[in-house]
Amino acid sequence: MDIKNIVMHVDVNSAFLSWQAAYDKQIGICNDIRDIPSVIGGNEKKRHGIVLAKSIPAKKMGIKTGESLMEARQKCKNLLIIPPNYDLYIKASKALRELLKEYSPNIDVFSIDECFLNFTGMEKLCKTPEDTAYKIKERIKEQFGFTVNIGVSVNKLLAKQASEFLKPDNVHTLYPEEIKDKLWPLPVEELFMVGRRTKPKLNRIGIYTIGQLANSDYELLSSVLKSHGRLIYNYAWGRDDSIFTGQNQIPFKGVGNGSTIHFDVEDASTAYKILLSLVETAAKRLRDAAMQCRVVSVGIKNKDFGYLSHQRKMLTFTNSTYELFKNIRELFDEAWNGKPIRHMNVRFTDLEIVSKKQITFFQDEYSMKMEKLDSTIDMIREKYGVNSLIRAEYIGSGLKPVLGGYPVDEYPDMKSIL
Ligand SMILES: [Mg+2]
């Protein structure tokens, strides 16, 4: 007999908003932003600010995730717009994963607010998987103050579809025998991987529900949509053979930080200081995520909007502020043409998860010391604020020693494929 797999998908309800609300409560703010029309979004004054998360009252007013803050404001005059706080999200996401690990050591992170739990074999230790899912959900609510939906099934795809059913604060199952009743009546765009571009193509060949997709002509679908057609056909039948890979970090591709400068930078030493302040934030973000990078790049915008950028692949992976800055400074020297600078950015890509072994093996004594220094500085700044400890060269320079928050575009719509 086949051994049935049990998979759970845990999805934080309106994650950014819930995490902010939970944090507000912790610091003694009584008004819950979840109860009023509110959104998390970037800078309203900048044109590209978009809605990243919305409260249920905001949703009721027709506000959608991904639309511009300007559009959202038109729909609701007294909308509360809260800037994103990625530090908080990373902390909340980590805390959630730690709790989930108590229920299964086998967890794949899907995005900052979504995890898959491989519960296969664990069901022997509980009444039913649903019963445990319910307990997990209640514990998260009680311990952290935010709610989740949990989907339970036999593979990742079905578990994810199940967690999409009625929100918030719910547990749903979607076992293969339930597909016909629970999945097939839904509009086809509610199937994972059927996006805005696929939907009209399916509609054109008469497919409007997931059931119609499942019962459509496989050859036709395959000729219209190629391999993507075959994938979503199988998804409509609940077939998914993706495995657990031990992906235990938020899958983001790169970390970047940039700043527009309100005066002309005409000398390298000022430019270095600004670059260092950008590296400080971006490097800390790598360390917070237990990631290191191998590719560094620097971008420079001149007063006349000319743009130069340079990148390099380093010999080893690192997340040390010292190492990263050293490379950034060399890149800057190679790239800069001496024209007055108005904007600079740094970016770290080609990321990998830090593994303890590598660290001690390849590093020289100096960079090991620097790494210790990094973790000490991180600790002090976390405790007493970013400006509690600053590098001497910034004193009297009029420049900020640590620059920048977390740019939104670093989390490409919070998704990756299964
Ligand atoms: Mg979510």
Image (cartoon, rainbow, N blue to C red):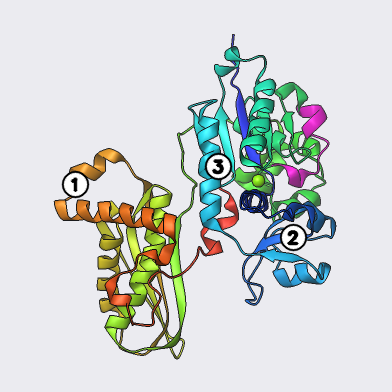
Disc 3 residue crowd, few under 14, some 14–19, many 20+, Cα 10 Å: many
* Rendered location of residue 116, percent (x, y): 57, 34
Residue that numbered label 2 is attached to: 38
Dot in front, 2 or 1: 2
- As helix, strand or loop, the secondary structure at mark 3 comes to strand
Q: Residue furthest front?
A: 28
Question: Which callout, 2 or 1, points at the residue further toward the start of the chain?
Answer: 2
Question: Which callout, 1 or 3, points at the residue further toward the start of the chain?
Answer: 3
Q: Residue 124's image quarter?
A: top right
Q: Residue 229's image quarter?
A: top right
Q: Can residue 244 be seen in this view?
A: yes
140 w.r.t. 307: above or below: above
Prevailing secondary structure class for the magenta stretch in the rendered image: helix
Q: In which quarter of the image is the C terminus?
A: top right
Residue that numbered label 3 is attached to: 110
Residue that numbered label 1 is attached to: 362
